[in-house]
Amino acid sequence: MSIRLRFAPSPTGYLHIGGARTALFNFLYAKHTGGKLLLRIEDTDLERSTEQSMHAIIEGLEWLGIHHDEDMVIQSSRRDEHVRLAHDLLDRGLAYKCYCTAEELVTMRETAIAEGRPPKYDARWRDRTDAPEGDAAFTVRFKMPQTGETTVHDLVLGDVTVNHEELDDLIIVRSDGTPTYNFVVVCDDSFMGVTHVVRGQDHMSNTFRQYQLYKALGHNPPEFGHLPLVDGLSKRKGSASVQHYRDQGYLAEAVVNYIARLGWSHGDQEIFSYDELIEKFDVIDVNRGSGRYDEDKMSWVNTQWMKRLSTQTLAERTLPFLKARGVETEVDAKFLMLVEALRERSLNLVQLADGALFAWQAPASYAEAAVKKWMSASSKAGFEQLIAALEALSSFEPADIEAAVKGVLESSGLGLGKLAQPVRIALTGDAVSPPIYETIAVVGQAETLRRMRAALSQFSA
């Protein structure tokens, strides 16, 4: 049997971390087993669903490298088929029309609570063949089994059993004629040939109702795997959209790596490539206990990937962030040298881009504390000697610059800090930069000399 999984988001917002983890686990399991991942957009909530959200979700999946197989299914496009299948259940006596009013349902619920019973529908229209006079509104309810129990073997949680007395006859078509979520999910899973449903544990209560619907529609229920929820997700931390992390300069590899570890592990290994995840991931290895979201850990994983990716790749991915800061450039030898010098000290691509700006933009001002500490009268003569030494160079590579700096240090008697720090301030506006020889080389000979001369006025008398 070819395994077929589906990721089925509702287009009511961006792709958030919880949804991204569900999509990733489905993708990894599909690839691990040689199966397929299908994508279904569940847009039957017409008031909240938007095309903008749908495109944002697809964009988030693509950025993460989660690609679906076959054509995407738009749930609302199958509404006529959903209604037809509901009426087929009516015709076969597996569903019935319920004419309860909203007031009756409220009274029913309040009475059950007062008597200490579960507040469920009492099935009063289940076996009736009459109907109110006139054009009374009705819902269509599915006849759930009333005795016995159902056990679902969950790939993550093991055997989970529910007594049928706990389940009421769920509505499959509302009084306005629109099919409900639980019903259309089953219709579309059957239509798409889904064999495995991997989703959040918050859907567990739906599973037992959907299990009966699969059988009523003549399909074998899929295998289920319910993922424990992730603790620590909130509006402030963790539940931010995938695009938020992309725009903050996180690497897709790092985000994938981190969310894969939210409830799953493989020994003590922390850093995984996509190929390693596909090779090692199995849904039966997902922990039963909740994972915990930790943004500091996410940042740490990102730093590991900042070091792991090639300099060429990091440079290419930094280009959009530089462009957003007004810098149009290409990946050349000097840019690669700059990226290599910055990668170890950058937490993300935003920091890398900000740290690289000095190569194209002269400082508009100088850090006052840095100027006060480093640009003293005792350093000015050495600084001026270095201007002359750099101007005399016919080659402006880091090794040539290093030789010039060392020559000035020897003749002036200054320590490296008293010479290098004023140069950093002149070139970047502050006393922090990549290694000084690479910093000078990246700025270039003419611009370095111009900036150094402009900074002469900062030295104290």
Image (cartoon, rainbow, N blue to C red):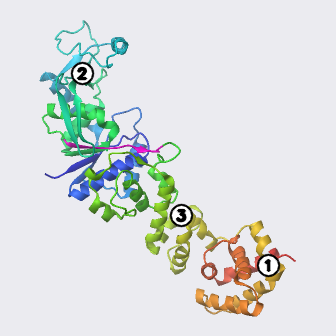
Residue at left offset 80%, top offset 86%: 381
Q: Is residue 398 above or below residue 244?
A: below
Q: CA distance from mark 3 to mark 2?
A: 55 Å
**x and y percentages locating residue 21 in the rendered image:** 37, 50
**x and y percentages locating residue 262 in the rendered image:** 39, 51
Residue at left offset 28%, top offset 38%: 77
Judging by the rendered image, the residue that carries numbered circle 1 is: 456
Q: Earlier in the sequence, mark 1 or mark 2?
A: 2
Judging by the rendered image, the residue that carries numbered circle 2 is: 140
Q: Nearer the viewer, residue 256 or 451?
A: 256
* Total numbered labels placed on residues in the image: 3
Residue at left offset 64%, top offset 91%: 403
Quick check: 271 left or right of 6?
right
Furthest residue in direction top, as rendered: 133
Q: Quadrant of residue 328?
A: bottom right
Q: Earlier in the sequence, mark 3 or mark 2?
A: 2
Q: Which residues are magenta?
A: 222-233
Quick check: 384 left or right of 132?
right
The C terminus - image quarter: bottom right
- Hey, what amino acid is under mark 3? Leu
Q: Residues within 10 Å of mark 3 (few under 14, many from 20)?
A: many
Judging by the rendered image, the residue that carries numbered circle 3 is: 347
Residue 223 falls within the magenta-colored stretch: yes
Q: Residues within 10 Å of mark 1 (few under 14, many from 20)?
A: some
Do callouts 1 and 2 mark residues in contact (Cβ within 8 Å)?
no
**x and y percentages locating residue 272 in the rendered image:** 36, 63
Q: CA distance from mark 3 to mark 1?
A: 33 Å
Quick check: 212 left or right of 258?
left
SS label for mark 2: strand
Between circles 3 and 2, the one closer to the viewer is 3
Q: Residues within 10 Å of mark 2 (few under 14, many from 20)?
A: many
